[in-house]
Image (cartoon, rainbow, N blue to C red):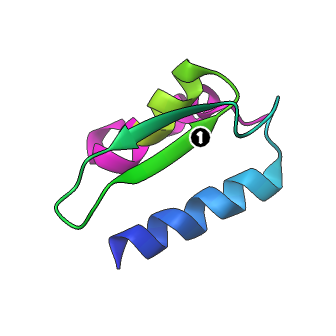
Amino acid sequence: MPLIRASVLMLALTLAGCSGGPTRHKAVVKSPTGDVTWWGPTQAVADARARWYADPSYRVAGNIPRLGYRK
C-alpha cells in the first residue's frame, strides 16, 4: 500500500510539471518487497526522489525543489 501511495504522489507531481527529461537518470531503492526505481532529469534529482520515498524525515516542503519540479 505505501508503494501505491508513493506512485500516486509521484504521478501527481509529474503531471504538475517536471523540468528536463524525466527518465534520463535513475536511482534504485532496495526494499523487502522488491526493487523500486526512481527516475529524474539528473542523477541528483533521481537520488532525491528515491530518498523522498525511503526517508520520511526527508519529506518536508523545503526539499520539494530538489525533486526537480517547478514552482
Labels in figure, total: 1
Depth check, front residue: 19 or 64: 19
Q: Is residue 58 magenta?
A: yes
Q: Is residue 21 magenta?
A: no
- Type of the residue with mark 1: Trp
Is residue 59 in sight in this rendering? no
Is residue 50 in sight in this rendering? yes
Question: In this rendering, is residue 28 above or below 65?
Answer: below
Question: In this rendering, is residue 45 above or below 58?
Answer: above
Which residue occupies 35% across, 36% down? 58
Query: Could you tell me residue 2's position as x and y percent?
Result: 35, 71
Which residue occupies 47% across, 63% down? 6
Question: In this rendering, is residue 34 above or below 21?
Answer: below
Which residue occupies 39% across, 41% down? 28
Secondary-structure class at tag 1: strand
Report whether 5 appears left or right of 70. Answer: left
Mark 1 nearby-residue class (10 Å; few <14, some 14–19, many ≥20): many
Q: Mark 1 points at which residue?
A: 39
What quarter of the picture does the N terminus occupy?
bottom left
Query: Could you tell me residue 70's position as x and y percent?
Result: 79, 34
Q: Which portion, as a residue range, is magenta?
A: 51-71
Report whether 19 appears left or right of 5. Answer: right
Report whether 26 appears left or right of 12. Answer: left
Query: Could you tell me residue 19's position as x and y percent?
Result: 81, 31
